[in-house]
Structures are given as C-alpha cells and as structure tokens.
Amino acid sequence: MAVILGIATVSLMATYLGLAAYYHNAFTYGTWINGIYCTGRSIQEVNDELVKDFVYEGVTVEDKDGACYVISAEDISYQFDFKKALEIYQKRQDPWMWIDSLFGGHQVELAPVVSYDREAFDACFDAMPFCQDKRSDKDRRVEIIRTPQGYALVNERTDVLFAEQARGAVLSAIEASKSEVSLVDSGCYHDLELTAQMRETLDIWEKLESFQDCGIVYRMGEEEIPVDASVVCDWIAVDDNGCFLFDESGGLRLKENAIEDFVASLAEKYDTVGTSRQFLSTRGDVVTVEGGLYGNKIDKEAETAYLTEAFYGGKREVHEPVYTQEAWKQGSDDIGSTYIEVDMTEQKMYYYVDGVITIDTPIVTGNTSRRMGTPSGVNFVYAKQKNRILRGANYASHVDFWMPVKGNIGIHDAAWRGKFGGTIYQTNGSHGCINTPRAAMEQLFDMAEVGTPVVMFY
C-alpha cells in the first residue's frame, strides 16, 4: 500500500512540475484574453489572433455644437500591436501556481500598444473647424447688438475651447483606441473672466431679454402676426447715441407712443374699408377696384389698451383684434370665396358660393349718358326687403325684392324691362341701381345673406 501511495505521489509531482515547465513559456490554464482562449499558447500566437480580430478606423471628435469630425486611422498612419501588453501580463502569471486556475480562470481585457504619425495627427487636428478661431482671450467681447430679429447678446467669453486641452483629449482617445471623444465631456471648454463693464452689459441683457419676450400673436384672418422680439425691440427707448433709457425703477423705458404706432401699422396694413383691391374678374382679367363701404376697420383705441395691458401683464395668447367695422373675412383677402360680382362693362352679375358660380345673369346698371352710372367699389348687402316702393325725384317703382348695397343703390328686380345686358345702360340705364331679371333676383334674394360682399367695377 505504501509503495502504491509513493508511486502515485511521484506521478502527481511529475505531472505538476511538467505542467509548470510547460506553462513557463505559455499562458497558464484557464487564461482568456479579449475573449480568446489562451491556455498553453505563446505570446506570438495570441498576438497574431488578437491583431487579426482587432479593428480601428479612427476617432470621431464631437464639439460643443454637436458637429462631428473624423480623424481616420489611415490619415495618421495608425498601427497597433498586443505583444508588449501580452508580455507584461504573462510575466504576472506564476507558472508554478497554475493549479489555482483549476478553481477559477483568468479573464482579462488588454489594449494594444499604439503608434501613429504625430505630425500627421497635428495637421489633421489643426485643420478642424473648431480650431480656426485664433482670437486671444482679451479680444473676446461681450456686447449687445441689434439684428432684424431684435436685440441679441454676443458673448464670446463663454464656452471657449482650450485647444491644447482638446488636442490632449483626442490624443488620449486615439492611444486608447477609442472610436469617439466629446470635447464637452472631456472638459475642454471654459468660461473666461469678465470685466466690470462686461458684467454690466450682461445685467442690461437680462432686462432686454425679459422685455423682448412677448407672447402675443395677432390673428388677422389666415395670417398670424407675432409681437415678438423683432417688433418689441422698436418699442425700447434709446438716446441719441443708441444707449438704452431706464425708468426710475431701473427697468427699460418704453418709447413714447410705441404701442399706438404698432397698432396703427396693423390698421394701415389690414384695414380694408375704402381701399384699392386687385380682383380677378370672371371675364378673366385682374381689375383694380377702389373705394366702397365693405371691409374691416380695427378699433385702434381698444387695441392699444389691450396690447398695453397684455404686454405688461406678460400674456401669451393668440388674439383677434376688435373692429369698429368687420367684414365677413379678416386679413388681406377679406372678400373670400362667397360674393356678388357686378361687371358693369359686360353688364353681367355673378353670385359665387365657396368659389363656384351659382347665378349668372345679365343686368342693367346706371345710365351713363345721364351721369347716373353705378359707382364702382367693394360694398355689401346691408339689408333685404320684399315688396318695396323705390322713390326718386320723379319716379316711384315697385319691386318684389330689394337688396341695398350702398346708400340708395341696390340690387332689385325690374318688371318694366323686357331686356337686360348689352349696351342698354349707356342710354336707358337705371338711376344707379342694378336691375336684375326677376327669376335671378328671387334666387339671389333667397341665397345671399346680409353682409355678403358686392364687388362692382367697369
């Protein structure tokens, strides 16, 4: 029994010593490097396999604006090898203690030893857009400027790139074979110290930014007019040198009549009563129609009061103005697609509903030879009556349907006429009204509403 035990002991010792000798120039049992099983393999064998599986295409550099720029491995003659790292790791292994690996393997991640062309790297880095700002710290300004969008702050002393720190961060990423590096996360941007004058400018900017932050939007028909910084900047009072003026509490002073002037500008653009309009006629040409009673007229006094309160109250809302006279539609195109068209040259009248002709009839308008021609202009139906007696200096005529559009001028049937259209109006026209065949007039009377625009032109 003792002999058998001795033989077994000697065999085990021989096996242990043999494996220790075997692992002396190879990795010990249970060694995994970068996911590769390395037990009993030499440094060269492992290096060859690691190099074969390792891929590095270069580094992507992201600046503070989120823009990304690439330095490729090829650009800088990037090379790599794991041999040195493998040698260091193998030296840490004790081949005599290989038995420890039976109870737990060794798994490690090793980075390659990197080499590259430093001059080529510097050339690539220096060519990047974020490196092109060559201003010195003392040349970096803090000032308020006027732009078409309102006042804006130019602060060149925040988030200033420290180029050499950025260079080091990118180099470190390449040496660690990282595929991307953020200059923000690497702490490469810093704020510079401010002078007393710069701090004063920033204080003024805070007031300006608050003053310009207006959330009122005027809805003018299909259009929306924001009262934003591009508008409000014109309301700020300045002296002859362009310096801001402040009130007793230190706030920015409002220019005298600034809000009234803005409301007046809205009225000038969007008030349409009596204005000149370009109108596409049914006959096919664009005619200029001037004057008339139809249209929108902003209540400037009410709007000035509203906007003053809304501005100082910090309201943020879409607002439709109050009108002293209101058309069917608001905005620049207040006629819309439902209207009556009276073409006095062609002696035709059309009624459009949602852009579609529903009535097409000949008419007789005012007698031009007696200077009673029907006036042009954009008017509207302001009443509807049946069985009306129309009276003048030397006449009294009964009509079944009466729709006045401007003063005593209106659209009505004319039973005394046997013909309509042509050139009748030139010598035997009306006293100014729009004579219409009864059937068409009855249809128009039933369909058209009070307020319908009436476009009248020659």
Image: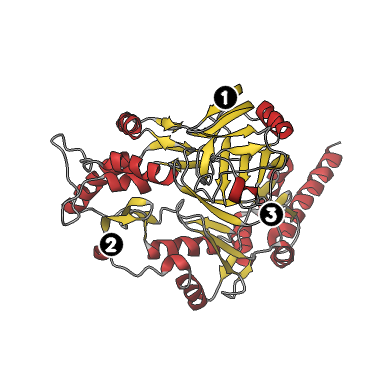
Q: Residues within 10 Å of mark 1 (few under 14, many from 20)?
A: few
Closer to the observer: label 2 or label 1?
Answer: 1
Give how far apart the Cα atoms at labels 3 and 1 are. 109 Å
Q: In the orientation shown, which residue stands out farthest toward the left?
A: 248
- Whichever of callouts 2 and 3 sits on the residue coming sooner in the sequence is 3
On the rendered structure, is 165 left or right of 44? Answer: left
Q: Which of 111/361 is in front?
A: 361
**Amino acid type for the residue under numbered disc 1:** Ile
- Residue assigned mark 3: 33
Within 10 Å of disc 3 (Cα), the crowding (few <14, some 14-19, many 20+) is: some
Label for residue 25? none
Secondary element at image label 3? strand
Residue at 59% x, 56% y is 286
Amino acid type of the residue that numbered disc 2 sits on in the rendered structure? Arg
The residue that mark 1 highlights is 389
Q: Which mark is residue 140?
A: 2
Q: Is residue 210 above or below residue 85?
A: above
Q: For the point 71% across and 32% down, which residue is it? A: 438
Mark 1: which secondary structure?
strand
Q: Position of residue 136 (x, y in %)?
A: 28, 67
* Labels 2 & 1 near each other (Cβ < 8 A): no
> Residue 22 is drawn in which quadrant?
bottom right
Q: CA distance from mark 2 to mark 1?
A: 84 Å
**Label 2 crowd (10 A; few <14 / some 14-19 / many >=20):** some
Mark 2 or mark 1: name the one nearer the start of the chain.
2
| Three-letter code for the amino acid on which mark 3 is drawn | Ile
The chosen color scheme is secondary structure
Lower sequence index among marks 3 and 1: 3
Return the x and y of residue 65 as percentages of the image width and height.
47, 55
Disc 2/disc 3 C-alpha distance (Å): 51 Å
